Image (cartoon, rainbow, N blue to C red):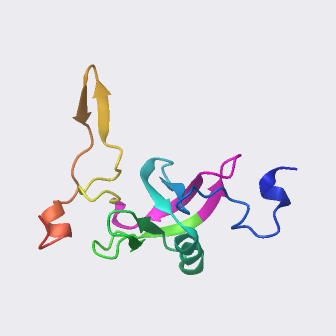
Amino acid sequence: MSDLDASLFWLDALKWDEDGMIPAIAQDATSGRVIMFAWMNRQSLQETLATNSAVYWSRSRQRLWRKGEESGHIQKLRSVRADCDGDVLLLSVDQVSGIACHTGRESCFFHELQGDRWVPTDPVLKDPKTIYPGHT
């Protein structure tokens, strides 16, 4: 029996880091593409499950980050999985508008190593200035 199977409380079965965080990978439910990585705490994970929309913890803002709260590019939750060690989450999501990245791209993973340099390989689907007016 694994640690996840043995737990009486599903949140306690997960391995949170010293700051109470766990890495979360968002994957597009239709294409299977990894579209972003973020951190979650207990509150963000519970709110994600309660609302069926992805909620993360913003380390830069030190607050809950409801994906799409500014951009409208929300992530509708399909499922949550934990890895074998219970220390990483995988969220299967429907990405509203097809844009997950603040750069206006489908995925945050758009830099590809080509030789000795990183090359942006995915197109910008929407200008970030129109996604986040008033931000520089």
Outermost bottom residue: 50
The one of 128 and 83 positioned closer to us in this rendering: 83
Residue 95 image position (x, y, % from top left)? 42, 63
Is 92 contained in the magenta span? yes
Residue 48 image position (x, y, % from top left)? 54, 73
Outermost top residue: 115
Residue 9 image position (x, y, % from top left)? 77, 70
Depicted 18 relative to depicted 58: above or below:
above
The one of 69 and 75 positioned closer to us in this rendering: 69
Residue drawn 68% across the image and 59% down it:
14
Depicted 85 relative to depicted 8: above or below:
above
Q: Is residue 84 left or right of residue 125?
A: right
Residue drawn 72% across the image and 65% down it:
12
The one of 20 and 125 positioned closer to us in this rendering: 20
Magenta residues? 79-98
Numbered label tally: 0
Asked which quadrant contains residue 42, the reply is: bottom right
Depicted 46 relative to depicted 91: above or below:
below
Residue 66 image position (x, y, % from top left)? 41, 74
Residue drawn 51% across the image and 48% down it:
32
Q: Is residue 105 left or right of residue 132?
A: right
Q: Is residue 127 left or right of residue 46?
A: left
Q: Is residue 29 visible?
A: no
Q: Is residue 23 visible?
A: yes
Is 41 contained in the magenta span? no
Depicted 44 relative to depicted 110: above or below:
below
* Quadrant housing the C terminus: bottom left
Q: Is residue 11 left or right of residue 61?
A: right
Residue drawn 41% across the image and 51% down it:
35
